[in-house]
Image: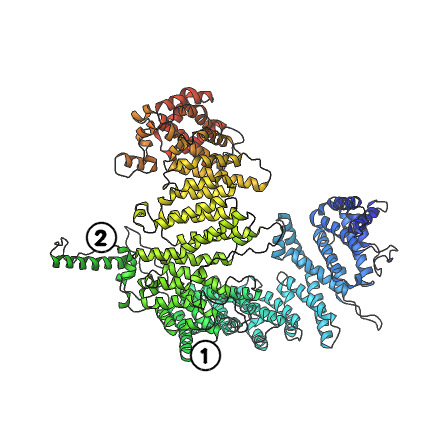
Amino acid sequence: MASSQSPHLTNIPQAVRIAASIDPNVDAQLKQQAIDYLTKVRELCQETWQDCLALYLQGAGAAGPSNAGKDGKEKLETDLRMFCEQVVDTVLTHKPQEMTVEAQQATYNAIIAFIDNEYVQGPCEGGQAFLRNKLAFTIAHLFLDVYPITIPSFLQPLFALFTPSDPSSSTPINLHPTLLTVRVLSEIAQEIHDTTIRSARPYSKNRQERDGVVRDVIRSSGDEQLAIDGMLGFIERGLNTLDQGGDEKWLEAVEATLKTMATWTPWVDLAVSLSPKSLSLYHRILQSRHITLRTASANIIKTFAAKGIQDPQARLEVLKVLNVVSLVDPLESETRGVKDNEAVIAFRAAIGGILATFGTEAIAFTENTDIPEPLRNEAEEIMNHALPLLLRFLSDRQYEVPISVAPFASDLLRVYKRIYKPPLAPPPVKGQPPPAVQSPPPPLSPERRQFLASMLDILIRQLAWPEEAEWEAPGNEEDSDDEMALFRSFRVYCRSYIESIAQIEKALHTEVVARIVVATLDAFQAGGPSAVPWQQAELALHLIYTFGELSKRFYNLPPEVATKAARDKVYRANANKAYNESAMSSGRTTPTMSEGDFSQPTIDGNYGNARENFDYDQYPLSPLGELLKRCMASGISSYPHPSVTLQYFEISVRYVEFWRYKRETVPPMFEAILDARGVHHPDEWVRRRCFYLFQKLCKDCRSDSVNEIVSPILDSIKDLLVINAELPAADSPDESPLTKATTGKTYAADQLYLFEGAGFLIFFTKSDPNKQMSLLEAVAGPLMSGMASGVESYRADPNDLQAVLRVHNHLMALGHFAKGFHTITDNQVETLPYTPPFKQMTEALLQALDAVKTQRVVRDAARFAFAQFVNAIGTTVAELVPRFVSVVVTEYESSELVDFMLFLGLLMHRLKTMDMLLLPLLSRIFAILQQPITGTDEAQTHSRLKDAYLTFFTALMNANLDGVFITERNKPEFENLLTTLLGLTQDCSDPGSQRFAFGFFARSVIAWGTSPEAAARPSVFADSALSAMSKAVANGSAAATNQHAIAKEERAKQALPGYENFIYQRLLPACFEVPARKEFNIRGSGLTLFEMAGLVRSTVQARGQEAIDFMLNDLLPRLGCPSEIANQFVNSLKTQQAKDFRKTYTDFVKAMRG
């Protein structure tokens, strides 16, 4: 043990007292020195642990700190002893090899003596549980280090503590020694068996082996029997004391012992842990008046049911002996209906766990075909006896209870699905005979069908909101509590089981759902809201809403029109027949097709609208169609509870295709969502959800009946289209009110759905241009005025953040309004009546942006709105992009440039003035990248910007827009661009950018380096080197792709003088020099090597024989490549296709590296 002369024995107490002092007069430097010293003590625990152990143990038996113990020494302060014990624990858990056998034995003897002096004969640390538990942790880890080799009898002194000494008349009974032993056993079991704790530790093969050895020796040495008998005896004595009205402190002791027993029973021998006597004791506890003990006992019995026994006969016998159904049934009945009692709910969940384990074990037994069939049949019989009990647990409204039996229910439905689920027909394979028809599954037995019907009915009713629950609108997470979150997750859990039953027996699902829904809707129609609680009404609509997840067919269509392609064919045939009949009657034409051949169109028309034009009403409704029809006819949308009306609107949006077939249903839907039930509801969160649903309804409900009511709809939401810019209070001094107002879930963000919906509606009025222009002006006019007002306020006071927010919100509203207008092609622009007003909006946007361009939120909003304007009216607005760039590019931050280049990438084909954009863009990019990197965030931002501009430049090259780089306007930055990209090819620390740079140059040599001689002469590539697409384009059998769009003769005319020197001096050598460097990670740079191979191949394609000669006579000899290998390499280059040459090039580079 520690030497009495060790300075640590004095220094550690002093240092802890100084470090823990709250006296402001203590010198800060001295305090830091104390902290540094203690850190060193912990780091060098292999040298200091004995001193720390001595300090922790001294004064055992003392009444408290500063009092002398039986060793004559003073007991130290608690925080000091805790620090010392932590140092000892560090050695035991992380450096056990530093303790000699002698030191381990001495430590054990000292701790046992401490227990005797402090816990058996002393004050038991004043009864403080945390000190006892901390000591138990230390003892358990010492045990794991020395058992069974060094100290095989480690546990014997602890087992002796199971029997508390009989109290004298003056001394109360001392349970602390027994509780210490129980805690030690619990710590041991968790360390060697508990999967959660073991998985939290770093994996170690030695640890795994050690844990297995400890378990085996405990089982074989008799320690297992002593531990179990000791705990059972203590439990029984405690129960007797409690039954006789004894001290309630026995309750804590018995509960702790039962919980420890539950950690031992899973891995000790069943013959030891389960006997008639112990089972009788557990049954007795289950009848106890102490609910916590009942729960602990139930958890132990659950481990018996889960016990894995190899012998099937013995395993089944255990399940029969436990007699779970007879055991759990009365307990479930006794505690059923108890609410607001967490202890009882926990007990019900515990006995539900017994049933679940029993059920899953029985099912696994029946599925094991290696087990004799009579035993499997017997297991199935006892499992079937548990099914009524399973239903009772599933019907409990306390969510923890049905969830406790989830494993049983899941396994049962899995087995049923395997037996009864109809097989999926394999897809037909072209050119092969149709697959054989699979035999249908066997029919459900009446008993199983009745069980599934009962289970389905229970699960469906579990979907209903609890009676005592206070409903919350979706999105209102601020006021949401854990109970509501639990209910919503419970709904998902029930839905998964409902869907499983529907897969087993779809007709049963339809039958039960229809019965509940129809009964609810009929009751509402007959008696109004008072006849149907809101929970029931919401449930009925929820069932309709989710019914389509299993089948979204609205009609029972015959096979000949069951698919959209078949309906299109029927519609084409009818349309052509009508056209031909009309043409013949008027004498305009004579049909040339044979009689009845109407499958091919003979007239121009939009046949893609067969879904809208097909006459569905001639066919009967499907179950879903019937439910939707009843829902609409019931008038349930008038129910005076927002949960019901919101669910109604959700149904309207999900099944919008159905309403399009029934024009008479559309106006009532809009009427409902526009009044106080929807977007004008008094609850803000209901309104905000309805804003989104309104937008979806406007977008998807394309119907003539909608076009007729566009004006009334817009009039109804006119008051909601007023934008109020309100700055929220910042949560901290570092938070920007503007950022808070423009991010996250805000009212203004949800309000944008209304503007988008208005855009859809106005777009649908395109058949009446005058009406469309009038409506457009009514919506867009106030937005432009509001934006102009914000700009004026900002000019008057640049510190007016509310003015900035007003500009931002109006820009976003204009963008979302434009989003409602469909994307058009360039040839449609001239025919659009709304092109002038959108151009006017764009001008207003540019003026606002010019005034408020220093504000990031305005720049972001302007970029979004501008993109939507381009989609709405195409190149008319795209031509204003250079002006847009000139206004803001100097203000752009790195992250904004990334987003802006993505935006330009989408517009590049529409921009005729791309060369006007490139110079300011390049200047800003290189200005930002040349700034020093001072932190991790800046490094990541620079990396993203680099990736973005490389992607953008590569996209320009792929789109054959390479000319923009070399216009007179952009030449000042061209050399800087090449230098930057060449530098990236040399940077092996950034393989992603390196790959992009080589890819850019591979395209550049074709664009700017094609020689007239190579273009005029036959290709140096053999026919075998050409891809199938290249051959097809060459012979005219395929349309030219971007790669072949420009002929090589044209490329030669566009060549950049002197670029061939850059190719031969810098680019081509880089393809061989860079991968030869040791810092080039050849294993992780496969894509980069592919781009290098592409650059080599493109150089030969652009320069012809000249490039071949350069490699053979100059470059490869310079690199030390033997002529024979060089010739082989060049021959492969000329004869292999690109994908094959990549491998050849990679192998060549690897050989060159050696």
Structural crowding at the residue carrying mark 2, measured as other residues with C-alpha within 10 Å and reported as few (<14), some (14–19) or many (≥20)? few
Identify the residue position indicated by label 2 in the image: 604
Q: Quarter-wise, where is residue 357 in the image? A: bottom right
**Mark drawn on residue 531:** 1
Q: At label 1, which amino acid type do we have? A: Ala
Q: Where is residue 969? Give x, y as percent.
A: 41, 31
Mark 1 residue element: helix
Of residues 1061 and 226, the one nearer the viewer is 1061
Structural crowding at the residue carrying mark 1, measured as other residues with C-alpha within 10 Å and reported as few (<14), some (14–19) or many (≥20)? some
Mark 2 residue element: loop
Of residues 842 and 524, the one nearer the viewer is 842
At a point 73% along the width and 44% down the height, the residue shown is 43
Of residues 1024 and 959, the one nearer the viewer is 959
Q: In the shown orientation, is residue 1003 left or right of residue 591?
A: right
Q: Residue furthest left?
A: 587
Q: Where is residue 215? Give x, y as percent.
A: 65, 56
Q: At label 2, which amino acid type do we have? A: Asp
What colouring method underlies this structural image?
rainbow
> In the figure, 1145 relative to 432: above or below?
above
Q: Earlier in the sequence, mark 2 or mark 1?
A: 1
Q: In the shown orientation, is residue 708 left or right of residue 1078?
A: left
Q: Where is residue 87? Give x, y as percent.
A: 75, 49
Q: In the rendered image, is residue 1017 in sight?
A: no
Q: Where is residue 14? Give x, y as percent.
A: 82, 48
